[in-house]
């Protein structure tokens, strides 16, 4: 049986910030307006009951619950306490791991102590130095949130902050960014490519330069960061780099929605109990994630009958022909599904970050090879890779043809008639 073991609970459909790039509020989809503002305890109870039967049937012993929003700290401590007790008492055979992803604005000592008591891992979304953070992550009155969030990050240093999540912003000089995370005492960082797709590119791309073969602004930024990071003897964990390196070293257990070849066993539970595919796909078009499934009326496994979820679950297998024939396919996996979308041909495209990924992966691969003793290089069996040669290879006729049914499925999501 296919397995979903990570559940992102949208416990609040509203937020106390109004970030300019947010897929919930400022990109392609406004359907959140029809959702209840907060998830109810009735919905948590219904979800726990569905989890018990689904996990039993699918032989799942370990489940990750991510409290997410909107802004999850708009709910009370009582809500979290009750929810965790309901999951534990309803599903005694499941081992739960809890995480909360917050914008950090309200995260004070009390909240840290509370989450530590319940062993909830805390992640904060952050955008770097004050000037850039405040440009994007603002309150509804336009005021920047840097001071509140920086305070929460500093507090977290001795209070078990699990990590910082940041959307890549190439406007920040990499050295400024690195200095910022060091002076805040961040120990664990993950970087996300901005939402966007072929019909709505993120602002980090200069449209006039898109057709240049050597134009890779995100990779250039990441490589500059990597060089600083590698030199630093007391460097924090940067998961994006560590994951790519692990994949290059042949670790098939590594992978997520954005890289590798693993299936994506992640579902979203909406505030009303709706069972959906991940909501970052909403940046593609209005209503893409919506279906009629709900924990109050149906089962979790019903999600496997949802077309978008089926594609998302298998998104590193269901890729366009170029990806199938790409030398870095095992690392990239075609990238995050939402970044492949175009109105003209649905998901039958490589990610918008294709060239950046080729540049970054080839740089990291060559860097690893230069750092290893020759006998280890022979043993792991990888060779130096040139960005330009990979681009040339992608222009050659494909050796591996795409299955026609996969191609039709990818194209079926196109929005232009
Ligand atoms: S690098 Fe480009 S062509 Fe290669 S797998 Fe990724 S998206 Fe596809």
Image (spheres, grey):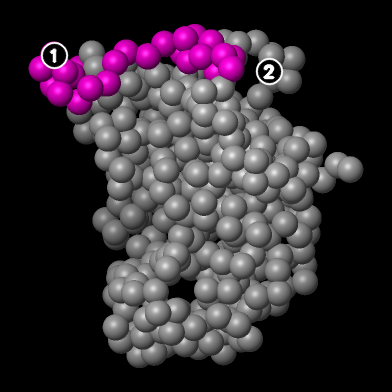
Q: Is residue 23 left or right of residue 128?
A: right
Q: Taken as a whole, is the magenta stretch helix, strand or loop? A: helix
Instruction: Out of 341 and 78, give the one closest to the viewer.
Output: 341
Q: SS at mark 1?
A: helix
Q: What residue is at 60 percent from the left and 11 percent from the top? A: 213
Residue lying farthest to the right in this orientation: 417
Q: Which residue is mark 1?
A: 374
Identify the image quadrant of residue 414: top right
Instruction: Out of 186 and 121, give the one closest to the viewer.
Output: 121
How far is mark 2 from mark 1, CA to CA? 38 Å
Residue 389 in the magenta stretch? The answer is: yes
Q: Taking 92 as reference, is 300 above or below it?
A: above
Q: SS at mark 2?
A: loop
Q: What residue is at 64 percent from the left and 65 percent from the top? A: 306
The residues colored magenta run 371-397
Task: Mark 1: give few (<14), some (14-19) or many (20+) Cα within 10 Å.
Answer: few
Q: Quarter of the image containing the N terminus?
A: bottom left
Q: Which residue is mark 2?
A: 210
Q: Position of residue 121 (x, y in %)?
A: 35, 63
First reached walking from the N terminus: tag 2 or tag 1: 2
Instruction: Out of 202 and 361, give the one closest to the viewer.
Output: 361
């Amino acid at each position: 049986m296919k397995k979903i073991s990570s559940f992102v609970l949208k416990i609040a459909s509203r937020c106390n910030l109004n970030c300019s790039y947010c897929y919930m509020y400022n990109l392609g989809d406004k359907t959140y307006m029809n959702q209840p503002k907060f998830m109810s305890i009735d919905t948590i109870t219904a979800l726990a009951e569905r989890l018990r039967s689904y996990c039993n049937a699918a032989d799942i012993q370990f489940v990750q619950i991510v409290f997410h929003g909107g802004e999850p700290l708009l709910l009370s401590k009582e809500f979290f306490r009750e929810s965790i007790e309901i999951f534990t008492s309803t599903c005694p055979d499941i081992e739960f791991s809890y995480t909360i992803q917050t914008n950090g604005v309200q995260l004070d000592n009390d909240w840290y102590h509370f989450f530590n008591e319940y062993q909830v891992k805390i992640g904060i979304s952050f955008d770097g130095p004050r000037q850039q953070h405040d440009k994007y992550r603002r309150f509804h009155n336009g005021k920047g949130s840097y001071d509140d969030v920086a305070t929460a990050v500093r507090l977290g240093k001795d209070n078990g902050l699990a990590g910082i999540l940041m959307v890549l912003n190439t406007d920040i000089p990499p050295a400024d960014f690195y200095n910022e995370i060091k002076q805040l005492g961040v120990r664990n960082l993950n970087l996300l490519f901005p939402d966007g797709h072929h019909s709505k590119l993120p602002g980090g791309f200069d449209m006039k330069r898109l057709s240049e073969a050597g134009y890779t602004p995100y990779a250039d930024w990441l490589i500059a960061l990597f060089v600083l990071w590698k030199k630093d003897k007391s460097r924090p964990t940067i998961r994006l780099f560590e994951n790519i390196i692990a994949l290059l070293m042949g670790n098939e257990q590594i992978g997520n929605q954005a890289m590798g070849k693993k299936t994506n066993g992640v579902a979203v539970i909406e505030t009303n109990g709706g069972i959906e595919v991940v909501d970052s796909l909403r940046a593609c078009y209005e209503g893409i994630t919506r279906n009629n499934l709900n924990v109050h009326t149906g089962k979790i496994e019903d999600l496997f009958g949802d077309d978008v979820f089926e594609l998302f679950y298998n998104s590193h297998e269901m890729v366009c022909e170029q990806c199938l024939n790409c030398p870095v396919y095992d690392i990239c996996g075609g990238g995050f599904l939402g970044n492949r979308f175009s109105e003209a041909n649905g998901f039958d495209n490589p990610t918008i970050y294709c060239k950046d990924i080729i540049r970054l992966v080839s740089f990291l691969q060559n860097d690893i090879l230069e750092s290893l003793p020759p006998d280890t290089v022979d043993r792991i069996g990888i060779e130096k890779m040139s960005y330009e040669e990979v681009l040339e290879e992608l222009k050659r006729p494909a050796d591996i043809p795409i299955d026609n049914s996969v191609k039709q499925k990818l194209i079926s999501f196109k929005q232009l008639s």
